[in-house]
Image (cartoon, rainbow, N blue to C red):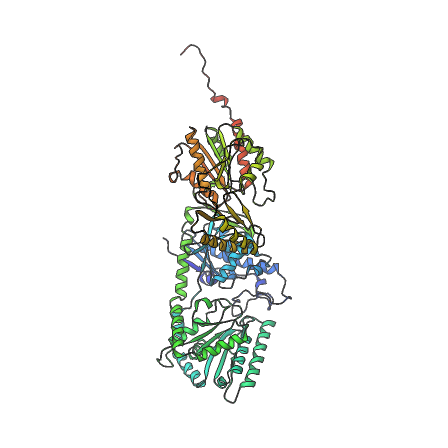
Amino acid sequence: MPSLSCHNLLDLAEELPPSPLRLPRVMAGASPSSPASPSPAGPPRRVIVSSTLGGLPFDRALYHSFLSANRAFADRLTEVLAPDDDFVWIQDYHLLALPTFLRKRFPRARVGFFLHSPFPSSEIFRTIPVRDDLLRALLNADLVGFHTFDYARHFLSACSRLLGLDYQSKRGYIGIEYYGRTVTVKILPVGIDMGQLRSVVSAPETADVVRQVADAYKGRRLMLGVDDVDLFKGIGLKFLGMEQLLVENPELRGKAVLVQITNPARSEGRDVQEVQDEARAISARVNERFGTPGYTPIVMISRPVSEYEKAAYYAAAECCVVSAVRDGLNRIPYIYTVCRQESTALGDAPKRSVIVLSEFVGCSPSLSGAIRVNPWSVESVAEAMSSALRMSDGEQRLRHEKHYKYVSTHDVAYWARSFDQDLQRACKDHFSRRHWGIGFGMSFKVVALGPNFRRLSVEHIVPSFRKTENRLILLDYDGTVMPESSIDKAPSSEVISVLNRLCEDPKNRVFIVSGRGKDELSKWFAPCEKLGIAAEHGYFTRWSKESPWETCGLVADFDWKKTAEPVMRLYTEATDGSYIEHKESALVWHHDEADPDFGSCQAKELLDHLESVLANEPVVVKRGQHIVEVNPQGISKGVVVESLLSSMVRGGKAPDFVLCIGDDRSDEDMFESIVCPANGSVKLPATSEVFACTVGKKPSMAKYYLDDTVDVIKMLQGLANAPSQQRPWPVQLRVTFEEGNGV
């Protein structure tokens, strides 16, 4: 294994001194009030969504500048990247488009991306004019990381709603199948640099300031807030909570103090000024109402504060209050916990701390001992502050120990190692697969296929078709010969024509193998006299129009429907656009016309519900493409294929050519039956030509693929024309033997 080289691309320009990286001037010339505006202190750390109706319109020029900046990073990275040895780790939304530019140049590049900002809900994300470009850019990475499950859930929901992509959870990993690649989603909050923070806390300068702060607030109950001057930090709500605390708890007047350190604003604008004015107005009102000589309830520190002084306030405060209404991870509670633990300036007594934490902050799920609040509820904030100040020393110690154990073991080094390991795991099959790019601009994507997985061409299959005598052709219906998007589900005249031509050849046995009911299929394929049909996943089978329907040998006990149908009806009533399909052997709940996200969620719930209530019944509950189906055990497309093969072998016509085409999960059973015959009860002749073909480029048991239903019809037409296209021997190679005198 080559050594791992993870480049933090935000620092790449500093690592490469030659030919400095220059970004477009328009990026630096953005409006000061624009969220995209840079500032001397660095770029904003969150995606800001305007809360007013007068938000700025989408600026296409700024978007192109954003792409140009990302392209400039890709240009520089191209100079140093060894794609066979290096891994690339991209940080945050500033370089959101970079995975696409890297994929264009290095289709097999091993790319990780970590988004440190909240990913917006799909309802908000879908309003972005370039939403699809941004999603595809993230999907061009191999591993995408988020701080919390909520952020990941919003990303997965956007992929489902906007791109129609499903995700699966397997062995603790969430994966999105995207053009043959599995994009892994990782959830792990970043930690803090324990070594750097300990060095600050243990510095003599910090110890001196800790003692000064302790003396200044001697006899007081010190609470601390540290926030950027930001619309979403909830500073005003925190101050209102402090006011309510003093109103409801007169005994805390003269004792409780809230020190608020406000970091300098990273940009200038109306919103920043409004936040500052609001905070000053509320604090002035509270101080005027409850303040006394020598006692100021709310102390605002707006000047620049050194890291030593800030660490001293963390160490001296018995409670930390974070009231952001929307935030990313926010590591302030982590820093507070470590400073309380590591500082020795106030003696060696057992350490204790309390955290009042907004439930909208990314670190909230990680700190189970925090008092979580809805910051919009002033009463809840006040009650949480009161609980923190009244909490016993023993409980404070227990909560503090729990937090410190987590923070100290899940530091930034742990986070980096974990991401590193998962990135290697996500990319382990890169060099055993074939990759090529398709699409233009920001819609570019990479298709990854197995080394033996290739497109099935007419030229490849026809020679095998011509030289064989007993052929079996198995075709799924929906999504294979009939497009899923078609409103009229009946087969077209083109499909009927090509099936009839194939059936006319006595060497061919052609079957439609579908989950649809037999009455529906019989009606649709009435013009095809010699076509075989396997309906309801093989529960009913007939060899031609004139032959009777045969059922599988299972006992026809369908009492389980009395249990399953009411459950399905309950979910149908609760899910607009869903409906129940009644088959003779099965019940199917469809949600293809429902809201994609809600329908998928309901399908998962229904699957669990049905598996629970039908646990003792002889049935199988399966999830398919926009369906949840219940059918008897022992019924599958794989079983019916084995039955057809067995019948042909018993009739003395063992197939020497098998073509199977399907598009969804149920068809994988068919592929397995013919690709892995050792697993089944029927053995095909060793000389048999076997072609398992899936529709669409995706991981499959099949060894071949066709792009869509149009390709499938062309393939079938090529086979139907094959017997009449026998090529004559070239004249120069034609040899004849006639009776005559021997030589």
Foreground pick, 133 / 741 = 133
Foreground pick, 251 / 61 = 251
Residue 110 placement (x, y as % from top left): 44, 53
> In the displayed image of the protein, which residue is found farthest to the left?
348
Relative to 611, is 31 on the left or the right? right
> In the displayed image of the protein, which residue is found farthest to the top?
741
Residue 104 placement (x, y as % from top left): 50, 51
- The vertical placement of 199 against 557, above or below, is below
- Quadrant holding the C terminus: top left
Residue 332 placement (x, y as % from top left): 46, 72
- The vertical placement of 495 against 317, above or below, is above
So how many labels did they put on this image? 0
- The vertical placement of 381 against 90, above or below, is below
- The vertical placement of 699 against 20, above or below, is above
Q: Is residue 322 visible?
A: yes
Residue 140 placement (x, y as % from top left): 49, 53
Q: Is residue 263 visible?
A: no
Occupied quadrant, residue 388? bottom left
The residue positioned 55% from the left and 78% from the top of the image is: 240
> In the displayed image of the protein, which residue is found farthest to the bottom?
293
Relative to 483, is 208 on the left or the right? left
